[in-house]
Amino acid sequence: MKKSINNILPAIMMILFGTLSSMIVGFLFFGPEIFNQQHPAFQFVVFGFWISALISIGEHFRMRIFAIGCILFILFITFAMNLLIFEDPVYLLRDLVFGISIALSIFVGLTILGKTVLLKSALNKIMVWLLSVIVAYMITTIILSIIHSPPDVLGYFQIQIAFAVLIGLGVSIGTTGAGIIFPKAVKRKVYLLI
């Protein structure tokens, strides 16, 4: 229990760094529109926080806590955001699908990072988290394209890929940087996949 308490500060810093890094990247491309709740660039704030929090929980606590955190976080964020910010049920579906896909993608990333010594460098962690975000965005985009069939499917995919790369880059650099500056108190066992 004491080791978990010692991980709270590094976990909070990872969330903070990941969110701020995502917001900085968003601000560079969209300016103050990232704070406009009706603009697509608002994803840099909301999803930047969401992804950073899930990565932080996964890196600093046991998988059981990660699983419980994912379920609670997905339910809370999905329904709280949609009750407070959005009124369209399409956003509820989008956030629910994205929450599940990002949780699964981060779980796979944690599994890869936890079992492979080769992926312990900062650059490799950035790549794993970036790919996790891109995969989650693509899963969400494919599912929502099937359900809603947007008029310009190719344009929709291009926009979502751009958001995935930019948000993923911001979050992955921020969370990895925080992990270097504020190392976790509990080191997981590392196994080599051969």
Image: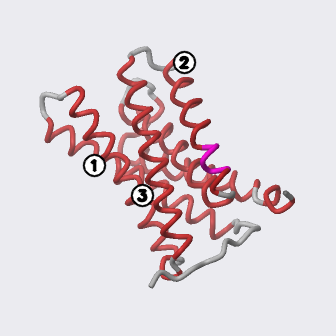
Disc 3: which residue:
169
Residue 170, percent across and down?
46, 55
Crowding near pointer 2: few (<14 within 10 Å), some, many (20+)?
A: few
Foreground: 50 or 182?
50
Foreground: 138 or 32?
138
Quarter of image, res 185: bottom right
Mark 1 lies on a secondary structure that is helix
| Amino acid residing under circle 1 | Ile
Position of residue 140 relative to residue 108, above or below, is above
| Amino acid residing under circle 3 | Leu
Mark 3 lies on a secondary structure that is helix
- The question of residue 66 being in magenta is answered with yes
Position of residue 18 relative to residue 96, above or below, is below
Q: Which mark is residue 84?
A: 2
**Going by the picture, which residue comes out furthest to the bottom?**
194
Residue numbers of the magenta segment? 65-69
Disc 1: which residue:
161
Identity of the residue drawn at 61% across and 78% down:
190
Identity of the residue drawn at 71% across and 66% down:
184
| Amino acid residing under circle 2 | Leu
Q: Distance between the residues labelled 3 and 1?
A: 12 Å
- Sequence-first tag of 2 and 3: 2
- Sequence-first tag of 1 and 2: 2
Residue 110, percent across and down?
53, 63
Q: Which mark is residue 92?
A: none
- Sequence-first tag of 3 and 1: 1
Q: Distance between the residues labelled 1 and 2?
A: 27 Å
- The question of residue 142 being in magenta is answered with no
Residue 126, percent across and down?
46, 66
Residue 73, percent across and down?
59, 37
